[in-house]
Amino acid sequence: MSNKNKQINEGLFDAADKFVAAFFKGLERNTANQIIKKAETAKLPPEAIKLMKDIEDRGEELKRIVKSLQK
């Protein structure tokens, strides 16, 4: 396989990988949002709901830190 074809294939795989990662990240976030909404509907105490949201935010913060370390 020529270098040009190899670069194109690598570019396609990279784009597909980013798409799949974004897709699953969206599913993950949507699931977390649904759980928080159900907790609100179930009238969980406000401090419990705040904690759930804080945990979600901290998880996103941790992912950003880890991603920056991988560069």
Image (spheres, rainbow, N blue to C red):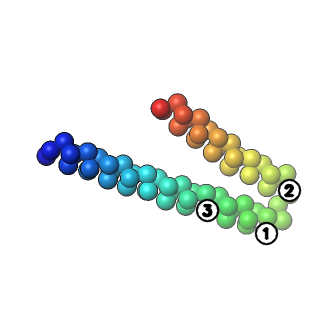
Q: Label 1 amino acid?
A: Thr
Disc 3, SS: helix
Q: Where residue 26 sits: x, y (%)?
A: 55, 59
Distance from disc 3 to disc 1, alpha carbons, whole Å, reads 16 Å
- Earlier in the chain: of badge 2 and badge 1, it is 1
Disc 1, SS: helix
Q: Where residue 48 sits: x, y (%)?
A: 81, 53
Q: Quickly name the residue at label 1.
A: 41
Residue ID at (79%, 64%): 40
Where residue 39 sits, quadrant-wise, is bottom right
Q: Residues within 10 Å of mark 3 (few under 14, many from 20)?
A: few
Asked if the residue under mark 1 is in contact with the one under mark 3, i.e. CB atoms within 8 Å, the reply is no
Q: Where residue 7 sits: x, y (%)?
A: 26, 45
Give the farthest residue toward the bottom: 41
Asked if the residue under mark 3 is in contact with the one under mark 2, i.e. CB atoms within 8 Å, the reply is no
- Earlier in the chain: of badge 2 and badge 3, it is 3
Distance from disc 2 to disc 3, alpha carbons, whole Å, reads 20 Å
Q: Label 3 amino acid?
A: Asn
- Earlier in the chain: of badge 3 and badge 1, it is 3
- 4 lies left or right of 28: left
Q: Residues within 10 Å of mark 2 (few under 14, many from 20)?
A: few
Tag of residue 30: 3
In terms of depth relative to the viewer, which is nearer, 24 or 46?
24
Residue ID at (64%, 44%): 59
